[in-house]
Image (spheres, helix red, strand yellow):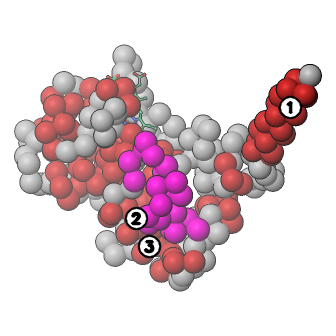
């Protein structure tokens, strides 16, 4: 008899613990975000980090995914789908990256706190550096338009691979079990995909290919043209 009571009590205690563990889940979901304020648009300067060009595609691909920081989930109250929500829920403090949550989680040593969390790969060092620079430059909502798209002598390391990083391609398509069993982690892998025609099929979102990136905007015209030009030049490893 006593044992039965004990096991009932243990069972209840377990249920209470489970319920409490679930409680912090949907903290305070933000209401539907306001339409994003229009970014300030100008020419592209190489030393400036542009939120709309450089960071938003990456945030959309790597962070604002279903089950993470999209509008439906908002894990930990963090929504990373547009400028305003990134500033507010990512606690971005212009000029002070070390005290901005959005930056802190990228450089966190503790794998339980680091974003994106394992088994996802951490962001590349150059990408983390872009967030740092953007916050130091005032965390502004800037967009730039290349006056002309330079498709001459496109290099792999200076142009092609950075585009693939910016659009989140590399983070989904690297590691030991890349998405769709497609690897884009280095020169050889990208070359193989390009030769098979699947790289441009996916980027140009042609019939018969999975459209990439799977969420957010398609790759802008200039990066598409540059990658095409690199392929046309027989994919130099430069
Ligand atoms: C959020 C993760 C994610 C991101 C970001 C992403 N992909 Fe994918 N990719 C996938 C998944 C999942 C598949 C498999 C889709 C399928 O088979 O329907 C895939 C498939 C592909 C394929 C195979 C397409 C085919 O039909 O043969 C290519 C090529 C590809 N991705 C390239 C890219 C490129 C280039 C980018 C960046 C512009 C990119 N991916 C961004 C997840 C991602």
Furthest-front residue in this view: 2
What's the residue at 81%, 45% (across, down)? Answer: 20
Q: Position of residue 168 (x, y in %)?
A: 40, 46
Neighbour tally class for label 2: few under 14, some 14-19, many 20 plus, Cα within 10 Å: some
**Quarter of image, ligand 1:** top left
Q: Mark 3 or mark 1: which is in front?
A: 1
**Does the CB distance between marks 3 and 2 fall below 8 Å?**
yes
Furthest-bottom residue in this view: 95
From the viewer's side, name the closer residue of 162 and 52: 162
Which residue position is annotated with label 3?
132
Q: CA distance from mark 3 to mark 1?
A: 55 Å
Residue 211 lies in quadrant: top left
From the viewer's side, name the closer residue of 107 and 172: 107
What stretch of residues is rendered in magenta?
101-122
Q: Secondary structure at mark 3?
A: helix
- Secondary structure that dominates the magenta span: loop
Q: Earlier in the sequence, mark 3 or mark 1?
A: 1
Residue 85 lies in quadrant: bottom right
Q: CA distance from mark 2 to mark 1?
A: 52 Å
Q: Is residue 72 left or right of residue 218?
A: right
Q: Secondary structure at mark 2?
A: helix
Q: Position of residue 34 (x, y in %)?
A: 75, 55
Residue 128, disc: 2
Q: Is residue 70 left or right of residue 22?
A: left
Residue 199, disc: none
Q: Earlier in the sequence, mark 2 or mark 1?
A: 1
Q: Secondary structure at mark 1?
A: helix
Which residue position is annotated with label 1?
6
């Amino acid at each position: 008899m006593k044992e039965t009571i004990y096991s009932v009590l243990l069972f209840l205690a377990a249920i209470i613990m489970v319920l409490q563990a679930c409680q912090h889940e949907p903290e305070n979901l933000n209401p539907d975000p306001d339409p994003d304020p229009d970014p300030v648009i100008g020419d592209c300067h190489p030393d400036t980090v542009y939120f709309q060009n450089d960071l938003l595609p990456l945030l959309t691909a790597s962070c604002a995914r279903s089950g993470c920081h999209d509008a439906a989930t908002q894990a930990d109250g963090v929504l990373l789908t547009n400028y305003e929500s990134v500033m507010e829920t990512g606690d971005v403090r212009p000029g002070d990256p070390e005290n901005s949550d959005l930056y802190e989680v990228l450089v966190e040593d503790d794998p339980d706190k680091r974003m994106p969390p394992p088994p996802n790969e951490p962001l590349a060092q150059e990408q983390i550096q872009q967030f740092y620079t953007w916050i130091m430059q005032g965390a502004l909502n800037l967009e730039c338009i290349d006056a002309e798209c330079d498709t001459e002598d496109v290099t792999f390391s200076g142009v092609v691979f950075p585009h693939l990083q910016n659009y989140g391609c590399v983070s989904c398509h690297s590691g030991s079990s890349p998405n769709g069993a497609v690897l884009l982690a280095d020169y050889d892998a990208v070359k193989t995909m390009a030769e098979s025609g699947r790289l441009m099929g996916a980027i140009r979102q042609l019939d018969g290919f999975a459209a990439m990136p799977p969420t957010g905007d398609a790759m802008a015209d200039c990066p598409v043209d540059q990658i095409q030009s690199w392929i046309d030049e027989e994919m130099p490893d430069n």
